[in-house]
Image (spheres, grey):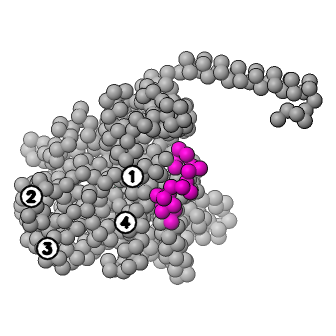
Amino acid sequence: MFEDLQLPTSVSLFGVLVALLVLHLLYSIFSSSDRKEPPGPRCFPLFGNLFQVDLKNLDQSLFDLSKKYGPVFQVNFGPKKMVVLAGYRTVKQALVNHAVEFGNREITPAFNDLTKRHGILFSNGDTWKEMRRFALTTLRDFGMGRKMSEGIITEECRYLIEEFEQLEGKPFSNTKAINYATANVISTLMFAKRFDYNDPAFQAMVQRENDIILLTGSASVWIYNFFPWLGPFLKNWRELIKNVESNMAEARKLIADLKETLDPEKCRCFVDAFLIRKKQLEDSEIQNLHYHDENLLYSVTNLLEAGNDTTANTVKWSLLYMAKNPHIQDRVQEELSRVVGSRQVQMEDRKSLPYTDAVIHETHRLSNIFPIALPHATSKDVTFQGYSIKKGTTVIPLLTSVLYDESEWESPHTFNPSRFLDKDGKFTKRDALLTFSAGRRMCLGESLARMEVFIFFTSLFQHFRFTPPPGVSEDGLDLTPIVGFTRSPKPQKLCAVRR
Ligand code: HEM
């Protein structure tokens, strides 16, 4: 390396390198003795703690480690250091009391490849702020948490009920139709378009959406995040990219159709609202840094992906919990018959349905849809619970450890709606229910999701009794989850018997 240099130059360069190395060593010794890092299991060279965790069951593995190392600990995945926050108090303290410090998104190599830091889910800084604000206000103006969404959901629910009626009480696998229904709700909000459940292109799109979520949380995509050069050799990685590209192409087509028929006087959906805003900025010659095609495409696909699988899975879990606990289903149906009868359920009925509301909240807790939330990153150096955590460190708010926190929930693995009822049978909120996370990055679609789950759940149980198929006992229903980034129930047969 130094052969082309003259001797005095190479000697002095060598001296500088040695001095830099010594300085670096001294700095690491002194800076680490000053700073108290979170504890954690001992690391192996190159692989870190990869052999001490089960990547296929990451949330449970980290929860087990938290029992040994405490509520703030660190693990190294290959070269990547991650700080894990465990338990309700710690997660809340970090995400709410230190909202800014813990409020960035960790953009792993996989997330970076998939969204190029555009949109809402995997962006930071001004792009994230503007896109999140726009999505929240647009969905709110457009009816999120309000009447218009309720109308869309109620209408979609009718199609779902029709679908179940056609089964005439025969055993069916509940997965597909529910995904089509929740996909249609988001699609109507995004594109003003609902699809027929039998449309093969729609079926393929929803299937790819589900696969994307499953693949993103798979062990090999985690490995890709730590060793990105392995990408081309990982089948799941190639599959993930293929699915994402196909769904992007579909979304591009839908956006192009809306662009062609855009009428600035008549806003039909989220895409229209974005295009109208873009045009207004261009017409008024205000500098437009954020309202461009990429942010539109990625915001829309973010909302489709974040809003479909999560909500559908919650509804699927609710059917399974009810089929497994027929005495709880009896009480829900008794309350629904008494309060609502056979008319269409409305959001306003919720306050008169305390038991049903408690069952839905217990479903949100036990189903634990997003077990490790989405990874966060520190936006600056922070001292937390006495530990120093450097800017840019990956942080995992371990929602499993919140929703199953034994100091908050008695027998956390039991389905017990009465934890959400007071002694008079009135519904009572529980702060530790962080299904939607907390702080700056908490779920943007919470009110829409809560409305969807409420309307779908109550309407389905008004019309049907859900049971295990003939020959299978309640105990025979399997609650083992399939864990990707979200937790979904294993596909299995149930019967929907008309009441
Ligand atoms: C039961 C259904 C749902 C659950 C359990 C859920 C849960 C979550 C969780 C845990 C996060 C991560 C928060 C964090 O990083 O700390 C999240 C983020 C997000 N969710 Fe949801 N979600 C649901 C439905 C929805 C729906 C219906 C939409 C959209 C219409 C949506 C849009 C988003 C978005 C855009 C983010 C990223 C927020 C950001 O980074 O600023 N979610 N959700």
Asked whether disc 1 touches disc 3, contact meaning CB atoms under 8 Å apart, the reply is no
Q: Relative to 132, is 384 above or below?
A: above
Q: Which residue is mark 3?
A: 170
- Mark 4 or 1, nearer chain start: 4
Circle 4: residue type: Gly
**Residue 459 visible (yes or no):** no
- Mark 4 or 3, nearer chain start: 4
Q: Secondary structure at mark 1?
A: loop
Circle 3: residue type: Lys
C-alpha gap between disc 2 and disc 4: 42 Å
Circle on res. 143: 4
Question: Of tags 2 and 4, which is closer to the observer?
Answer: 2
C-alpha gap between disc 4 and disc 3: 37 Å
Q: Residues within 10 Å of mark 1 (few under 14, many from 20)?
A: many
Front residue (pair 146, 109) = 109
- Mark 1 or 3, nearer chain start: 3
Position of the C terminus, as image quadrant, is bottom left
Quadrant where ligand 1 appears? bottom left
Front residue (pair 475, 88) = 475
Horizontal placement of 157 versus 285: left or right? left
Circle on res. 473: 2
Looking at the image, which residue is at 38% across and 63% down?
A: 210
C-alpha gap between disc 2 and disc 1: 30 Å
Question: Of tags 4 and 1, which is closer to the observer?
Answer: 1
Looking at the image, which residue is at 32% across and 41% down?
A: 60
Circle 1: residue type: Phe
**In the rendered image, which quarter is residue 50 located in?**
top left
Chief secondary structure of the magenta span? Answer: helix
C-alpha gap between disc 1 and disc 3: 32 Å
Asked if the stretch drawn in magenta spans residue 231, the answer is: yes
